[in-house]
Image (spheres, rainbow, N blue to C red):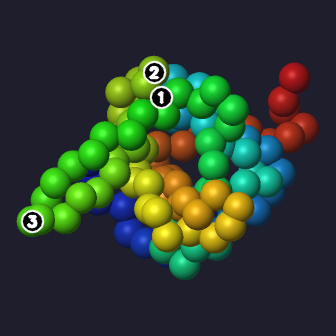
């Protein structure tokens, strides 16, 4: 999933309905709407993953900088990046591509 996705012009950056966000390819639950917030990135941003979410962190070095890529353990697709300058209580920003997600409204959860 290395396609380019434009900030502030993607499906879930400004989506605020209650529910969960799952891996678009495997259906694995990843993020809850209660942990979504506007981090100003233009992409869906979350404070944390759903408990036991299958998200792996991959440290990469590029041009002398270290960044943390996020990938689904189940589908092996790139989800986005982990930023370490988020708000309390986690101090994290899970900055995720909309194209990596599918939204499940709370009314559709079993």
Q: Is residue 36 above or below residue 75?
A: below
Measured Cα–Cα span from mark 3 to mark 1: 31 Å
Q: Secondary structure at mark 1?
A: loop
Q: Is residue 51 above or below residue 93?
A: above
Q: Measuring 86% from the left and 40% from the top, which residue is drawn there?
A: 106
Quadrant holding the N terminus: top left
Label 3 close to label 1 by CB (< 8 Å): no
Q: Measuring 46% from the left and 63% from the top, which residue is drawn there?
A: 84
Q: Is residue 25 above or below residue 82?
A: above
Q: Which residue is mark 1?
A: 25
Label 1 close to label 2 by CB (< 8 Å): yes
**Quadrant of res 86:** bottom right
Q: Secondary structure at mark 2?
A: loop
Name the mark nearer the viewer: 1 or 2. 2
- Residue 63: image tag: 3
Name the mark nearer the viewer: 3 or 1. 3
Q: Specify the farthest residue to the left.
A: 63
Q: Which residue is mark 2?
A: 74
Precedes in sequence: disc 3 or disc 1: 1
Residue 31 percent across, percent down from the top left? 65, 43
Quadrant holding the C terminus: top right
Measured Cα–Cα span from mark 3 to mark 2: 29 Å
Measured Cα–Cα span from mark 1 to mark 2: 9 Å
Any part of residue 58 in sight:
yes
Q: Residues within 10 Å of mark 3 (few under 14, many from 20)?
A: few
Name the mark nearer the viewer: 3 or 2. 3
Is 61 on the left or on the right of 40, as rendered?
left
Precedes in sequence: disc 1 or disc 2: 1
Q: Residues within 10 Å of mark 1 (few under 14, many from 20)?
A: some
Precedes in sequence: disc 3 or disc 2: 3
Q: Secondary structure at mark 3?
A: loop
Q: Residues within 10 Å of mark 2 (few under 14, many from 20)?
A: some
């Amino acid at each position: 999933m290395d396609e380019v996705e434009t900030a502030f012009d993607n499906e879930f950056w400004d989506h605020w309905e209650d529910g969960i966000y799952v891996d678009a390819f495997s259906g694995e639950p990843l993020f809850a709407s209660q942990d979504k917030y506007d981090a100003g990135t233009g992409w869906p941003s979350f404070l944390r993953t759903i408990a036991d979410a299958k998200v792996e962190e991959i440290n990469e070095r590029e041009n002398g900088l270290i960044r943390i890529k996020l990938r689904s353990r189940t589908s092996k697709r790139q989800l986005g990046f982990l930023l370490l300058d988020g708000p309390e209580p986690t101090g994290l920003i899970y900055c995720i591509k909309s194209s990596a997600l599918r939204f499940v409204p709370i009314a559709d959860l079993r």
